[in-house]
Amino acid sequence: MSDTVPADPERRDFIFIATTAAAAAGAGLAAWPLVDQMNPASDTRASSSLDVDVSKIPVGGEIRVLIGSKPFFIRRRTEAEIAAANSVNIERLPDPETDEARLRPRPEMARSTPLY
């Protein structure tokens, strides 16, 4: 008589499936830190969006806002300053190209004016 037990095909299938599932889970757990490190840092995400209430700026006044430790100046111009900026001879500027000629609207966004 032989002492060998015939192999059970159902048991073999279970071991194969369990081993494959454990290997796939291990590969996923090993890949997660590599994929997660490609996300932006939390301080970068926090500094990328900033809401500034510009309605409280008086006419002719300005505020300074720090974004990523760099100052941004937001000024509410007076009507005289706006008129002076619009009356500049564009041909005398170092770069005489107008915003309309230089910028194109994004096709995926439904806007009637170009994005500045």
Image (cartoon, helix red, strand yellow):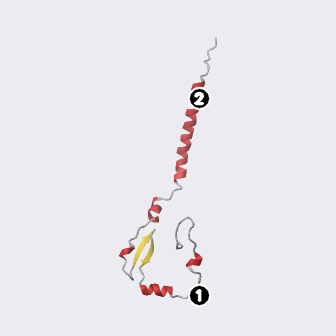
Residue found 41% across the figure and 75% down from its top: 64
Which quarter of the picture shows residue 100? bottom right
62 to 52, vertically: above or below: below
10 to 105, vertically: above or below: above
Badge 2: few (under 14), some or many (20 or more) residues near its Cα, within 10 Å?
few
Residue at the spot of label 1: 91
Residue found 49% across the figure and 85% down from its top: 85
Q: Amino acid at mark 1?
A: Glu
> Comparing marks 1 and 2, which lies closer to the viewer?
1
Q: At which x and y percent is residue 25?
A: 54, 40
Q: Secondary structure at mark 1?
A: helix
Residue at the spot of label 2: 13
Badge 1: few (under 14), some or many (20 or more) residues near its Cα, within 10 Å?
few
Which quarter of the picture shows residue 23? top right
Q: At which x and y percent is residue 15?
A: 57, 30
Front position in the image: 108 or 74: 108
85 to 105, vertically: above or below: below
Residue found 37% across the figure and 74% down from its top: 55
Residue found 52% across the figure and 72% down from its top: 112
**Residue farthest toward the right in the current orientation of the protein:** 1
Going from N to C along the chain, the mark reached first, 1 or 2, is 2
Q: Amino acid at mark 2?
A: Asp
Q: CA distance from mark 1 to mark 2?
A: 80 Å
